[in-house]
Image (cartoon, coloured by chain):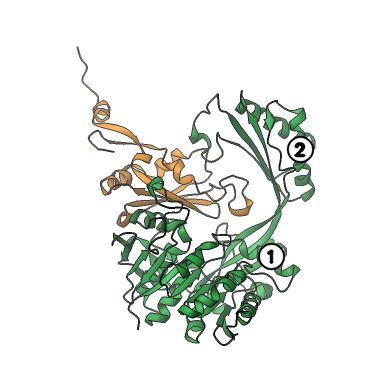
Chain colours: A green, B orange
Amino acid sequence: MKDTIRIASGQGFWGDWLEAPVRQVEAGPIDYLMMDYLAEVTMSIMQKQRSRNPELGYAKDFVPLMRRLLPTLVRKGIRVSANAGGVNPIACATAVLNEARDAGLAGKVAIGVVTGDDLMPRLEQLLAAGHELKNMDTGEPLEAVLDSVQSANAYLGAWPLVEGLRRGANILITGRVTDTGLTLAPMIHEFGWAPDAWDLLAAGTVAGHIIECGAQCSGGNCMYGWERIPSMHDPGYPIVEARPDGGFVVTKHDGTGGRVSVQSVTEQLLYEMGDPTDYITPDCIADFTTVSLKKNGKDRVEISGVRGRPATDLLKVSISYSYGYKAIGTLVYAWPEAVKKARAADKIIRARLDRLGLNFDETVTEIIGVDATHGRLAGKPDPDIAEVQLRIGVRGLERTAVERFSREIAPLILNGPPGVTGFAGGRPKVEEIVAYWPALIPKSEVCPKVEILEA
Amino acid sequence: MPKKKSRRAKKRMATKKVRLLELAHARSGDKGDTANVGLIALKAEYYPLLEQQVTAARVARHFRGVIKGGVERFELPNLGALNFLLHGALGGGGTLSLKTDAQGKVFSTALLRMEIEVPRSLRV
């Protein structure tokens, strides 16, 4: 057994810095490259893409990235775990295998494809069997929006990935696997952790939580001393040095920018946190109030003491459904009396919408530069402010009403308050809303599947 | 004749008001229509002050008119941190929200605007 493995985070979301995984592979030693591509609504975007083209429905960026990295990955023996497969992991794996063959790597790349998370084809059957798939936030049963459901995926944990590694895969491509599972799986595999070693599984889960958002634990979006964090044009993405006893160090490659400190790691530990004693994943429950952090050299933080509890019998299901339309329009008002003019314009637009008899679920006005992010907490605006941006958004079930709204912004340039500009972007875009519906399902209803495809 | 100072006035003399920005750093994120704010003491000695004064009720008052639901607080003394859940904070949350900060990314700094009473002798 190795006494340490190095797991590097290369992508914190679909759209993260393209250079990050390349730097992780090239700038120093690592054993695993972990990449998280899936946010809550990403699955529904991918579902839409697959419905238009059965060859799509995964993180497309992953394929050219693998083309770029595969020769080095193979040469250095680095394995990859990524949930880039989205709603079509097989198509994603096939595309990567084609790249491997083109690169002359036939016989050297084995892809472990993890599926079984997609519950969409079985949705009616599950409901018929008495699983209500109630919205975890509102308690409403799924029946209420069943006709508009676009995708339904169970969050799988680390174990199917462990199976893939055991069967010799050097690239793992999954659908909806938890962000933390992507980091935990290599530890379970390398160190032979048992399915009921709750403290160890919790330690690996905490490690996963720390690095799942890429640079957000290594200097990115770090409030603590942000101006003194060096070389942020080239931030080092985080690396976990894991040990068999569950202790681990968070660090980054030498010679990269950014900073790994107790403060930067603490900020990330608290990101998207609920009850810290009860961090539930498919693999265990981690207690974040047992985590102990200590500086251990430059850009090195040692984490120890993590305690865990047995996993629950349930899996979370990420369901997306269509919910009407929205559009957001903006205009800029300049000094003098910029705020007054923006407020007057808002009143005018609202009066015109009323007169047209348009009904919206919600109409939201913000004045950027005054109250958009902190509301009344921002205090009174500077009466001499150079300019502000008026931002009005509407949401409704009928597309026609939202479309009509989108035509009510531009006229203000000629028939509203003076000192207005900034309409270069044209009419606001009408967007179809795909909303998120979190639910729970018994683990016994979900069967993860692992296939090994070889180049 | 000088009046005897009230207890409140005495307390005022022994303390000063400080913005949380001087005492803590923070990070926030979202879960549906709930924003979370992790508030982290800049120095270990500040944590007891945060724990004592930045209560769920205080935070709910601070965000009155900005959020629609209640506030929950969890303590993480191991990290010198408090975690707050601000319910009904994100205009429906996720893709439903029409707000600039639909994912609650800067509720963190909005909390740092709050002022608390600290001993006058405390160096910040």
Q: Give percent across and percent down for residue A2.
A: 35, 81
| Crowd band around label 1 with a 10 angstrom C-alpha radius: few (<14), some (14–19), many (20+) | some
Residue at the spot x=41%, y=59% of the render? A256
Q: Is residue A137 above or below residue A168?
A: above
- Mark 1 highlights which residue? A150
Task: Say whether disc 1 or disc 2 marks the residue closer to the N-terminus.
Answer: 1
On the rendered image, what quadrant is the N terminus of chain B found in? top left
Q: Give percent across and percent down for residue A169.
A: 52, 83
The quarter of the picture where residue A49 lies is: bottom right
Which residue is more in the foreground, A89 or A196? Answer: A89
Horizontal side of residue A320 vs B10, given as left or right: right
Q: Give percent across and percent down for residue A326.
A: 70, 48
From the image, state whether disc 1 or disc 2 is nearer to you. 2
Horizontal side of residue A251 vs A416, given as left or right: left
* Chain ID, mark 1: A
**Do callouts 1 and 2 point to residues on the same chain?**
yes
- Alpha-carbon distance for marks 1 and 2? 31 Å
Q: Is residue A141 visible?
A: no
Residue at the spot x=75%, y=36% of the render? A410
* Chain ID, mark 2: A
Q: Is residue A81 above or below residue A210?
A: below
Q: Which mark is residue A408?
A: 2
Disc 1 marks a residue whose amino acid type is: Gln
Disc 2 marks a residue whose amino acid type is: Glu
Residue at the spot x=47%, y=80% of the render? A162
Which residue is more in the foreground, A85 or A422? Answer: A422
Count up the numbered dots: 2
Q: Give percent across and percent down for residue A389.
A: 62, 35
